Amino acid sequence: MCRHLAYLGPEEPLGRFVVEPGHSLYRQSWAPRRQRYGTVNADGFGVGWYASEDPQPARYRRAGPIWADPSFADLARVVRTGALLAAVRDATLAGADAEAAAAPFAAGRWLFSHNGAIPGWPQSVASLVPLLPPVDLLSMEARTDSAFVWALALHRLRSGTPPGLALAETVLQVAEAAPTARLNLLLTDGETIAATAWGDSLWYLSEPGHRTVVASEPYDDAPRWREVPDRTLLVASRRGVTLAPVENPIESPIGEPVEDGPAQDARIQDDPVENPVETRASSPTLDSVRAGAPPSPKEPCT
């Protein structure tokens, strides 16, 4: 998986965030603008969402590209939600574990995704295996580094660790074992969002008291998008967003949105969204996208 998005706010159709915007995840599956590793996110996709008065999310996941699934287009048009997590995937090993490897992963009320990769997997993080109960390892949805990172984070959540701290501790633990790992993590329970920027792009859009979106990259060119600095933990609700270094996370009630601060405004204004959204192109075929993509030494995500 290499691009992901989470939303909290008023109920909207899934497609309002995943399909309709000029640079939605749908388009990012073949034409991402800010992806640093890999070029095509065509090895699976998934959406998890929350229905009113049901704390456990529903999921729709497939092993193929999002543009090749006409059923999802209908689903996204009519299903409404006030909270979702969606992802499109670029697999290190194409086809491995099929849709079981597609984010979001789920447990209870939680949805999770990982944008990144662990070089040297699985040998590089073998030393972390004893930290997990055997049943957690045997319950992993897929045999991928993303599923393993999720198992580490979920173990902390189940022990009562707050979500932001659980992600920060997991990132630091994995990065110690595999220093070049890329670990952009995204987690929601339908009421809060926690995310890390660690090796790839992460942005957010906040309208305090109304809605919050956290995404690998902006899905449009609205000026209120803010970039999250690398090695930063983000914790958000519908009320706003707080940022802290991953190495020194602070779990606290969500306060005023960070973009209201003058220093933050100055930083963002100097770094506008690049590459204006083009007119929507028709959905590609998988062969045409892979054939048309420029050669890249960048390794894909998992």
Image (cartoon, rainbow, N blue to C red):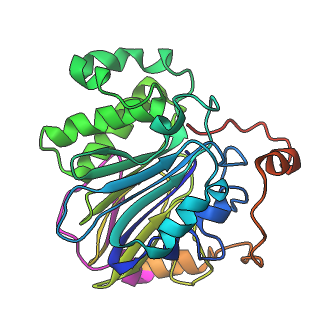
Could you tell me which residue is drawn at 25 percent across and 48 percent down? 165
In the image, farthest residue toward the left? 160
Query: In x, y percent, where is residue 191?
Result: 24, 66
Q: Nearer the viewer, residue 130 or 89?
A: 89
Q: Which residues are magenta?
A: 241-262
Question: Where 273 falls versus 289 (above or below)?
Answer: below
Using the rendered view, name the quadrant where residue 143 is placed. Answer: top left
Could you tell me which residue is drawn at 65 percent across and 56 percent down? 29
Quadrant into which the N terminus falls: top right
Residue 1 falls inside the magenta stretch = no
Residue 192, visible in the rendered structure: yes
- Left-right relation of 245 to 277: left
- Left-right relation of 247 to 228: left
Marker count (numbered): 0
Query: In x, y percent, where is residue 150?
Result: 35, 37
Could you tell me which residue is drawn at 30 percent across and 20 percent down? 138
Query: In x, y percent, where is residue 60?
Result: 44, 53
Q: Nearer the viewer, residue 197 or 247?
A: 197
Question: Where 80 falls versus 99 (above or below)?
Answer: below
Quadrant into which the C terminus falls: top right
- Left-right relation of 155 to 211: left
Residue 259 falls inside the magenta stretch = yes
Query: In x, y percent, where is residue 112?
Result: 37, 48
Residue 226, visible in the rendered structure: no
Using the rendered view, name the quadrant where residue 83 is placed. Answer: bottom left
